Amino acid sequence: MATNVTTLITCDLEDGKGKARPGEPVSFGIDGTALELDLCPKHRTALEEAFAPYVEHGRRVRPGSGQARQSQRARTGQAPPPVQAAAVRAWAAASGITVSPKGRIAAGLVERFEAEQQGTK
Ligand SMILES: [Zn+2]
């Protein structure tokens, strides 16, 4: 005899609150943590509306970067990401330090920049 198993995915925000509406997986991330939950259309819309201003102004980050970025750069000696390179050049220019507008920035200069940034936070 064949057995048919039906899995009904319901909205995680309505679990245990009477008859939950059907949901579908929605994934998002914050502080380097990828999260997923099942949401009905109503709660999905609420999540999208809440996130909209942050998504609009956010930068896309490749998986594996983010939190591990600094320590990974220290290990591998990689060049800083473009955004930081621009910040280092701007800081160097403001500090009267000559830096080539192209190419790799000296590691020592990046370290001075980072030290100064941490000192001003
Ligand atoms: Zn819901």
Image: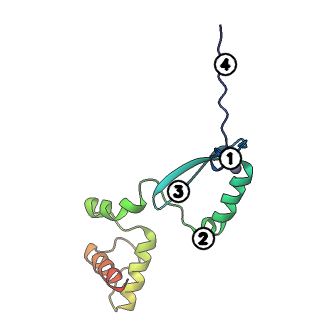
Residue at 66% over, 58% down: 47
In the rendered image of this protein, does residue 23 appear above or below residue 104?
A: above
- 10 Å crowding of disc 4: few (<14), some (14-19), many (20+): few
CA separation, marks 1 and 4?
27 Å
Residue at 64% over, 15% down: 3
Q: Which residue is mark 3?
A: 29
Q: Nearer the viewer, residue 26 or 55?
A: 26
Percent x, y of residue 100? 36, 79
Q: Is 88 left, or right, of 57 in this rendering?
A: left
CA separation, marks 1 and 3?
26 Å
Q: Which residue is mark 2?
A: 57
- SS at mark 1? loop
Q: At label 2, which amino acid type do we have?
A: His
Tell me which label, 3 or 4, sits earlier in the chain. Answer: 4
The C terminus lies in which quarter of the figure? bottom left
Residue 4 - label: 4
Residue at 53% over, 56% down: 29
Tell me which label, 2 or 1, sits earlier in the chain. Answer: 1
Percent x, y of residue 24? 66, 43
CA separation, marks 3 and 4?
35 Å
Q: Nearer the viewer, residue 13 or 99?
A: 13
Q: Nearer the viewer, residue 91 or 40?
A: 40
Tell me which label, 2 or 4, sits earlier in the chain. Answer: 4
CA separation, marks 2 and 1?
35 Å
Q: At label 3, which amino acid type do we have?
A: Gly
Residue 17 - label: 1
